[in-house]
Image (cartoon, helix red, strand yellow):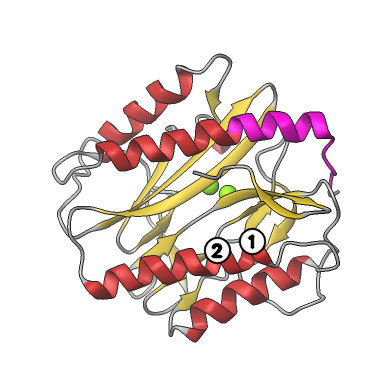
């Protein structure tokens, strides 16, 4: 069932979203080659809990042990922060974070360069971000969930990249994952109609090579099947009469 949120719920999700955005801004600030993903995770948890009533959404969700998902290079999503994973110059790391506040969630991710990266990698990051922007722009009344995926896919595949199919965006609210699923591919006017008060986490996962995935032995980390690099950007958005509003804007 797709739930429509009240103005009060949207206000709370907006406050959760600002903490999410602040966490990602903090990650960008502290990220350095040589630090571990565990270092990022502990700083993220400290930052979130420094806000009254805010808790990390991921910790304990389906048994996930950490505050962040940190996914390096060919890892697409759900990488587990670890003191053994040291960030190397030239890598990219997707930092994904959720915050729960007063019973409601917000969710956002960005892929950050570690030090200097090649122009090819910069292009992957830029296009993935542009595909998210296009998906958000399509999240308006009169459109359907399929219009969002169509817009994302057009930008990403138009640039020659792969669009991951096995993982999708989602509704979000009192539950971290709610209906509807929000694929990053599709056709206009398909799937659920977009209604005022719907809150969606839109999150393109884009690869330089094959879009197919496999899951590592840790049962969490999802990687590209061909080892190609992958980028991931995400915002939580509410559908309003005035158009999409980003609740996790930086
Ligand atoms: Mg996320
Ligand atoms: Mg999400």
Q: Is residue 100 magenta?
A: no
Judged from the image, the secondary structure of the residue bearing numbered disc 2 is helix
Q: Relative to residue 235, is residue 122 depicted above or below?
A: below
Q: Relative to residue 186, is residue 168 depicted above or below?
A: above
Query: Which mark identifies residue 192?
Result: none
Judged from the image, the secondary structure of the residue bearing numbered disc 1 is helix
Highlighted range, magenta: 3-16
Q: Residue furthest front?
A: 242
Label 1 environment density (alpha carbons within 10 Å; few <14, some 14–19, many ≥20): many
| Residue highlighted by disc 1 | 136
Number of numbered tags placed on the structure image: 2
Residue visible at 46% across and 78% down in the picture: 162
- Secondary structure character of the magenta stretch overall: helix
Label 2 environment density (alpha carbons within 10 Å; few <14, some 14–19, many ≥20): many
| Residue highlighted by disc 2 | 132
- Image spot of residue 59 (x, y percent): 50, 30
- Image spot of residue 5 (x, y percent): 82, 39
Residue visible at 15% across and 46% down in the picture: 33
Q: Nearer the viewer, residue 190 or 47?
A: 47
């Amino acid at each position: 069932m797709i739930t429509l949120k009240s103005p009060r719920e949207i206000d709370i999700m907006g406050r959760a979203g600002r903490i999410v955005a602040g966490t990602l801004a903090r990650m960008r600030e502290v990220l350095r080659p040589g630090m571990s993903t565990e270092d990022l995770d502990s700083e993220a948890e400290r930052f979130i809990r420094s806000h009254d009533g805010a808790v990390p959404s991921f910790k304990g969700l389906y048994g996930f042990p950490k505050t962040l998902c940190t996914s390096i290079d060919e890892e697409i999503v759900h990488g587990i922060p670890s003191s053994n994973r040291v960030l190397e110059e030239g890598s990219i790391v997707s930092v994904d974070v959720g915050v729960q506040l007063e019973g409601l969630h917000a969710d956002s991710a960005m892929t950050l360069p570690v030090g200097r990266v090649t122009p090819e990698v910069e292009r992957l990051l830029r296009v993935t971000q542009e595909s998210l922007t296009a998906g958000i722009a399509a999240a308006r009344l009169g459109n359907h969930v399929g219009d969002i995926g169509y817009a994302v896919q057009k930008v990403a595949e138009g640039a020659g990249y792969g669009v991951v199919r096995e993982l999708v965006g989602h509704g979000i609210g009192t539950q971290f994952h709610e209906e509807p699923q929000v694929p990053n591919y599709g056709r206009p006017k398909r799937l659920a109609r977009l209604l005022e008060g719907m809150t969606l986490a839109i999150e393109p996962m884009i690869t330089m090579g094959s879009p197919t995935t496999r899951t590592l032995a840790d049962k969490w980390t999802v990687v590209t099947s061909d080892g190609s690099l992958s980028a991931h950007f995400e915002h939580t958005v509410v559908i309003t009469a005035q158009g999409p509003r980003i609740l996790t804007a930086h």
